[in-house]
Amino acid sequence: MSEASSSYDVALPAPFQVAVTVLHFAQVIHHKRPKPNLLGYDWSLLSVIYLLFILLISCCGCVSGVRIPPTPRVGSNVMVDANNVADPTIVSFPEGVPGFPGERYILFYTSVFNGNVPVALSDNMRQWVRTVDALPVLPRWASSYQSRGSSTGLTSEGTWGPSVVATSKGWVLFFSTRVRSLGEECIGAAFAEAPTGPYLDTSNRPLICQPRLGGSIDPDPVNLPNGQTVLLWKSNGSHQIWEEALSSTKMATVGKVHLLIGPTQAWEHGNVEGPDMIAARSGGWWLFYAGSQWYSDDYGTGVAWCENEWGPCEKKKDSQLLLSGPGATSPGGLSTFKAEDGEEFVAFSTFAVPPNRHWNPSKDPRELRVARLLSY
């Protein structure tokens, strides 16, 4: 794929056109003679009142003329695993995980302990059992390197932010890893017949890579109602969230690249990452993301509302959804998933204590938390 670039026009809110029409109507019914003034109308007190009324009921909290729904809420969360789980992705199987009778959930995550893409299984979302490395072999374009946990003597192949999606023939795993020829992290796609793997990427180059923007990480596939799948990701140097459609095999990108959001709010401290998207019940899409630096207790999870899956996306004045609290700091890496009963849940990671730039995973492990998604 060529280096991502995007431009799109943001439609002006339609209620402004309605307001002008109402001004005209108000002047007619009150026999006001239009005078050559602003917009060609006499801005009498009555006209101003009509204008403010229309703007208040039609434009408050709207993007491109569409009202923004109330911000989603996350229910009480429970710490369900303390074994250094970051960037969690959970997939549910109400009829049981193929090959693992009795288990109903698969967890893919980032870890410096358990291989490239460690997998855990559970029948209740609370107790997890480690099983296999879903990606035992990295693609030929990837390079191995020591992770931030190397100070402990532990090494990692350096894979990050795994996510999966089903296809008509099996499953596709998306992951980030460093490209040998570039020195930047980019996104790969691997295929497996079973959801637990083993996955294999036989490509000669990454699926998505933006070297001029510092590389590409944090892939997240989203299934649309029309059957199409799109992929979200972060440009690692410019700290922006992008989106592009995937082919029917989910192993290639097609169409135009869309820029969804960048860092615009103070709490984000110049960085947004870890995107995930879900359809809003009242229309549009919710875009979840993490902001600030992962090793800071300022790190948290935000949300933006998108008019459609391609944007434009808008943040409210304070978009932060999850903040650090006692015993659970730096909440990030949020992903949504359906439980076996069909209800929407979220999974995310926190630290028990604030980490620092010299993060030691054996002393500062990330914890997995799950919660019900409310009012979305």
Image: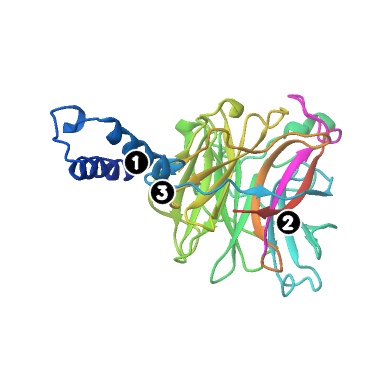
Element assignment for label 1: loop
In this rendering, the answer to whether 127 lies above or below 102 is: above
Left or right: where does residue 139 sit relative to residue 83?
left
Name the quadrant containing residue 42.
Answer: top left
Element assignment for label 2: strand
Mark 3 touching mark 2, by CB under 8 A? no
Residue 229 place in picture, x, y as percent: 49, 59
Residue highlighted by disc 2: 107
Q: Earlier in the sequence, mark 1 or mark 3?
A: 1
Residue shown at 37%/46% (left/top)?
A: 65
Disc 1 from disc 2: Cα separation: 38 Å
Disc 3 from disc 2: Cα separation: 36 Å
Q: Amino acid at mark 3?
A: Val
Residue 355 place in picture, x, y as percent: 78, 29
Task: Kindly identify which numbered label has been placed on residue 224.
Answer: none
Element assignment for label 3: strand
Name the quadrant containing residue 294.
Answer: top right
Numbered range of the magenta stretch: 343-363
Q: Amino acid at mark 1?
A: Val
Disc 1 from disc 3: Cα separation: 12 Å
Mark 1 touching mark 2, by CB under 8 A? no
Nearer to us: label 1 or label 3: 3
Based on the picture, tell me whether residue 125 belongs to the magenta stretch: no
Residue highlighted by disc 3: 66
Residue 330 place in picture, x, y as percent: 72, 34
Residue shown at 52%/53% (left/top)?
A: 203
| Residue density around tag 2, few if under 14, some if 14–19, many if 20 or more, within 10 Å | many
Q: Amino acid at mark 2?
A: Leu
**Dominant SS type (magenta):** loop
Residue highlighted by disc 1: 10
Left or right: where does residue 179 sit relative to residue 2?
right
Q: Earlier in the sequence, mark 3 or mark 2?
A: 3
